[in-house]
Image (cartoon, helix red, strand yellow):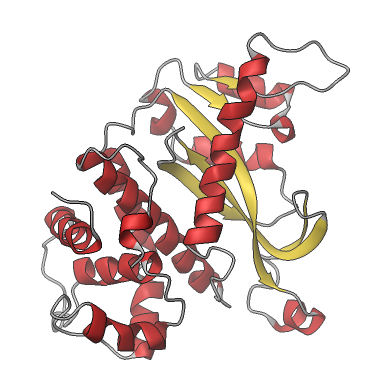
């Protein structure tokens, strides 16, 4: 296989179509299959077309023959929102299909997902009650929206993720992710999780230790440093690099969603695109596992 967008989309479509349930659905089959829908969603993100209406005009010219049927903008939007569970399944299926899945080291962090700025938006938005105000340390300002909590390998492969209200403690979210899917920990004996100072907690340490997991993070200045702490900085920078890929190349900040399902679907769409690129790069033996340059044009 070669490293280009057409090859990635072909391999992605075939793989998704193979593991999707083939049981018959009630009613007429959709003209755009689920495998085609997910492939179309990944291509949209990789090519950086944020407007769904513009994307559906873009496809026939730039990807001729790739998708025999294209729905209207409203139909595509509704299908994508309803496909949130399918997007999550696809992320996990592709991640498990790489040799990076069982990496014994995880990197965890959270990043802001802004959903609005004006005061009227925060009052009238359908996200009110889930989204809220949080503080972004990297930009030294408050924002209104959610936080994306991402667990990935040092190579950038997403393992698990969650969207949460920004004022929920990062340690609580990490605990909830581990409790929701305990097989993630049992599959990796001796797992090491690298985090920042926001994850300092005796309760979290005890929770993870009971499951055979070690959490390594920087110590506060008034505490004795952990052994090997000087090696943490380059590893912790990896998660910042992954977040930068999601924001800078996959337009995480410009998701444009205004509903709960819309935000979930568009964030999942971007994580799926990142996972698909890593999966394909690994399969084709590329030296830079997380490079998206070959797929953005």
Please say if 200 is above or below 210: below
Q: Is residue 216 visible?
A: no
Horizontal side of residue 69 vs 265, given as left or right = left
Residue 107 on image: x %, y %? 53, 33
Q: Compared to 252, does 158 lie above or below?
A: above
Can residue 209 be spotted in the picture? Answer: yes
**Quadrant of residue 129 within the rendered picture:** bottom right
Name which residue lies at 37% across and 56% down: 293
Which is nearer the eye, 75 or 249? 249
Quadrant holding the C terminus = bottom left
Residue 156 in the image: x percent, y percent? 44, 40
**Would you place residue 276 above or below residue 234 in this image?**
below
Give the image location of residue 74, x and y in percent. 38, 89
Question: x, y percentage for residue 268?
Answer: 43, 60
Q: Residue at x 56, y 28 (%)?
A: 235
User: Relative to 280, does residue 252 appear above or below in the rendering?
Assistant: below
Label count reads 0
Say which residue appears at 46% left-offset and 25% top-offset.
105
Q: Residue furthest right?
A: 222
Along the line of sight, which residue is nearer the eye, 49 or 192? 49
Q: Is residue 119 left or right of residue 62?
A: right
* Image point (61%, 41%), residue name: 109
Name which quarter of the figure residue 102 lies in.
Answer: top left
Position of 229 with respect to 223 (left or right) is left
User: In the depicted view, which residue is nearer to us: 288 or 245?
Assistant: 288
């Amino acid at each position: 296989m070669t490293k280009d967008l057409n090859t990635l989309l072909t391999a992605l479509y075939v793989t998704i179509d193979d593991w999707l349930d083939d049981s018959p659905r009630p009613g007429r089959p959709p003209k755009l299959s689920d495998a085609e829908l997910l492939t179309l969603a990944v291509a949209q993100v990789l090519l950086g077309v944020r407007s769904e209406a513009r994307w559906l005009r873009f496809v026939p010219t730039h990807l001729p023959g790739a998708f025999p049927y294209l729905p209207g903008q409203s139909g595509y939007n509704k299908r994508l929102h309803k496909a949130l569970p399918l997007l999550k399944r696809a992320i996990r299926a592709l991640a498990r299909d790489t040799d990076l899945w069982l990496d014994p080291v995880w990197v965890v962090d959270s990043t802001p997902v802004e959903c609005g700025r004006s005061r009227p938006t925060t009052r009238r938005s359908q996200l009110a009650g889930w989204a809220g105000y949080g503080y972004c340390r990297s930009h030294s300002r408050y924002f209104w929206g959610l936080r994306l909590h991402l667990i990935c390998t040092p190579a950038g492969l997403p393992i698990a993720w969650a969207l949460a209200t920004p004022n929920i403690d990062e340690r609580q979210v990490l605990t909830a992710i581990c409790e929701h899917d305990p097989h993630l920990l049992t599959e990796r004996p001796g797992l090491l999780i690298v985090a920042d100072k926001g994850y300092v907690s005796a309760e979290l340490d005890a929770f993870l230790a009971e499951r055979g997991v070690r959490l390594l993070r920087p110590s506060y200045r008034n505490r004795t440093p952990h052994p090997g702490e000087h090696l943490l900085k380059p590893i912790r920078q990896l998660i910042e690099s992954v977040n930068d890929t999601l924001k800078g190349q996959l337009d995480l900040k410009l998701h444009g969603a205004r509903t709960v399902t819309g935000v979930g679907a568009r964030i999942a769409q971007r994580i799926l695109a990142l996972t698909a690129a890593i999966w394909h790069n690994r399969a084709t033996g590329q030296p830079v596992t997380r490079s998206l340059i070959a797929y953005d044009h």
